[in-house]
Amino acid sequence: MTIDMAQFHQVFFDESFEGLDVMESGLLEMDPGSADPEQINSIFRAAHSIKGGSGTFGFTDIADFTHVMETLLDEMRDGRRQVTTEGVNVLLASVDVLREMLTATSEGAELNPERVKVQKADLDRLLAGGDAPSTAESAGSEDEIAPSAGDERAGWHIVFQPHSHMMRTGNDSLRLLRELESLGDLTVTVDTESLPPLSDLEPEDSYLSWDMTLTGDVSQDQINDIFDWVEDDCDLSISSLSSEPAASPVAAETRSESEQQTVAIDVPATAAQSEAASGEAKKSASSSGASSIRVDISKIDALINMVGELVITQSMLSMLGEDFDISQIERLREGLAQLERHTREMQESVMQIRMLPISFTFSRFPRLVHDLSTKMGKQIELKMTGEATEVDKTVIEKIGDPLVHLVRNSLDHGIELPEDRVAAGKSEVGTVELNASHRGGNIIIEIKDDGKGLNKEVLLKKAIEKGVVSPDAVLSDQQIYELIFGAGFSTAETVSDVSGRGVGMDVVRRNINELGGSIEIQSEVGVGSSFVIRLPLTLAILDGQTVSIGSEMYIVPLVSIIESIQIKQDMVNMLAGKGETFKLREEYLPIVRLHEVLGVKDAKAKEINEGLLVVVEGEGRRCGLFVDDLLGQQQVVIKSLEANYKKIDGLSGATILGDGSVALILDIPGLIRMAGNSPTDYDTGIRKTA
Amino acid sequence: MTKSQATENEILYDEENSQYLTFELAGEDYGVDILRVQEIRGWDVVTRIPNAPPYVKGVLNLRGAIVPIFDLRERFDLPCHEYTKDTVVIVLRINSSGGMRIMGVIVDAVSDVLNAGSDGLTNAPDFGSRIATEFIAGLVSAGDKMVMLLDVDKLLSDDQSPESELAAAS
């Protein structure tokens, strides 16, 4: 009898991704030179179980790859190998590749074998370098990680051709040459062929290229380290002198090949593509992970207790009901009160099951900050507080990408370069804080940096340039900050692969709004900025205001309501003879007549003074919803319309009222869009239903 | 007791003989696969869905699930009439691209359970485009009556993508 192994795949992938997270955080905390053996051990164990699992399920590629990592970790664990920054970085990169492999396998997608090969070669190179630990260790700590090709210590042949714009990125070729010289004997030949006549010379462009021979006891990584900052801005080829006549070793070849490839193509574009690709991969990974959830056993126990209580109450009530007379009314009331309490407690414990600590989302940030700060040449310290704050699982899944975007923005636009910080009288280490906390019925996530802050003048100028705002408009600070959420709005002077392309902030806000939350910005020029995200505790329940339109009832989410007012007909202004607007404290707001948008035929209030205006806000736009009356406020359980039917424009879901009837929940941003963008849309909608 | 249960099971799981729940709609007889029927309930007030097609009467709370209710007369362009005490809602389980869904259809009255062997089934005659036969899975005769068997999966599925319906029509 055969067992269908596929049913265990999901568990394997879930566990493997967890293992990868363990490895990643372990590697990030690892201190080169003096690593805690227990820490290496936990990383090793994670790698080992991934290897074991993938072997069992027949994912030999993953097993092979993990095996190499495991061997390396094993040597580190036994103290046969020093823990070096290089080693940690290669292992971190390998974790990334492994994650990609797992993601691809779990989705049955094609994997780029080239990447795996390159990374594996890197690992092999590290391993091979440690084959003769006795000599390597005596020779010096850094040399241990010399490539297998670098056994020949004779020297290197380096061809360095800076791109013309290299100097504009703040890199000086001369400095690089000086650094090279400090490694060993350097012979330099300069190529002045592309140097234009003096009259055509752009003083900021670089026209020279160099052909160098470096002799001495130097590893390729030492050379790579020097060119680290400029590798995207130049054509670089490094080859070993002794291996040159013979065929180059595989590791070096694949490496330089891959380098050539990245250089050949426009760099920002490829970076963007790979970023987008990895983002997509991450997304789909999280969506596939939605199928199962790990729950703390204590939560289940609490729930079972609660069910026990409920059963007792229920039997008590049914006994009471068997021979009920009016003298027992007091006991009945008591029983019902108990039932109510238990139901509420049980509701809470069931909600608890869906709750996960936000550290699931936060855990990726140390790595992100580590990588990006190195890349950008900034010194950044990440402080995280409130990681234990529990959030609904759906929130965890959806908030990840917006948070990544905001943190990237803080790193890229917020924190200045060390020298600028010192010049501004600040410590050269910038701080980014991530705080999560419960406040009332909300979860507050704050991303705070002590960087340069948002510049209102620049924002406003840009908005006027783009025609988003008219030049004579008077905007409040908050309204100016709101501008960065507009699509295609970027204030970054240059487009980097980190941010500045102007896609994103609008998506950030959309994602947060989808979760029923809001985002606020506080900023002070020169001091820093903070983004405060406010999310509802759970997506399953919301505070709603019931409004009536004719014989129908609708629920307006309380978070989006600003106020409710009654206005007179003469306060209404017509816009181009069609759109109704009214003035609310210096602001003209459009009126959305809900009975028209929703096609209610028996609405009582036709004239504007007969009903009420509920002023609501969604996605930064405000409007007044015209309804017959306000009924009451209550908590409602959100039910999906899509589960059995389909998505309806202007509705975010439905709920069941106390009497068992169904009431529909209005989607405020959707309604504003429907009413604002194309009034004809809902006109035809009515005609269809009429 | 056990014996009658056994015979019941035999009937239910007999591959050759499927059972159909038949109902009336404007004097015509229709049938649905009985295994797709979740329950039959009386007509109840529903909550109207704004801007939905007229045959979608609204949604109903079915023990916590929000279930759309379709009027089959209007779905098939039959003349509408008042809902009476005989009007019932048949709650059906249908398969769609998004998984199993539940929906209710309003019919005039439920008539009978019909046993029909697969040999008694005939395909619906092709009327061209004059009469929409897309929902009809087949015809079966019960005594002197003809019963149209519905393909329940198409009732909602087609409605979900009017584009594909248009594409199919053109």
Image (spheres, coloured by chain):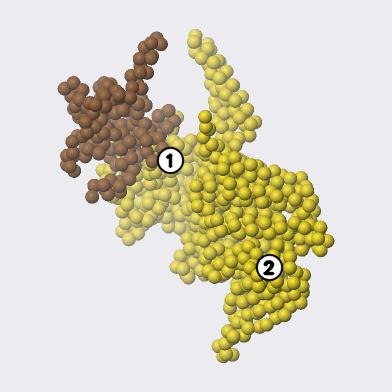
In this rendering, position of residue A680 left or right of residue A28:
left
Residue at 60% from the left image edge and 43% from the top image edge: A54
In the depicted view, which residue is nearer to us: B70 or A553? B70
Residue at 79% from the left image edge and 57% from the top image edge: A133
Q: Name the residue furthest front.
A: A246
Q: Amino acid at mark 2?
A: Asn
Residue A127, image x, y percentages: 71, 56
Q: Secondary structure at mark 1?
A: strand
Q: Name the residue furthest right.
A: A138
Query: N-terminal of the two: label 2 or label 1?
Result: 2
Check residue A653 in the rendering and tell me which mark sits there, or answer none: 1
Residue A236, image x, y percentages: 62, 72
**Up/down of A196 relative to A422, above or below:** below
Q: Secondary structure at mark 2?
A: helix
In the depicted view, which residue is nearer to us: B7 or A468? B7
- Residue B17 in sight from this viewpoint: yes
Query: How busy is the neighbourhood of tag 1: few (under 14 within 10 Å), some, or many (20 plus)?
Result: many
- Residue A175 in sight from this viewpoint: no
Q: Write down which chain is painted brown.
A: B
Q: Are marks 2 and 1 in contact (CB under 8 Å)?
A: no
Residue at the disc numbered 2: A224
Q: Nearer the viewer, mark 2 or mark 1?
A: 2
User: In whole angstroms, how far apart are the C-alphas of marks 2 and 1?
Assistant: 56 Å
Q: Are marks 2 and 1 on the same chain?
A: yes
In the depicted view, which residue is nearer to us: B79 or A522? B79
In this rendering, position of residue A216 left or right of residue B155:
right
Tell me what hue chain A is rendered in.
Answer: yellow
Residue at 66% from the left image edge and 46% from the top image edge: A47
In the depicted view, which residue is nearer to us: A410 or B100? B100
Quadrant showing the N terminus of chain B: top left
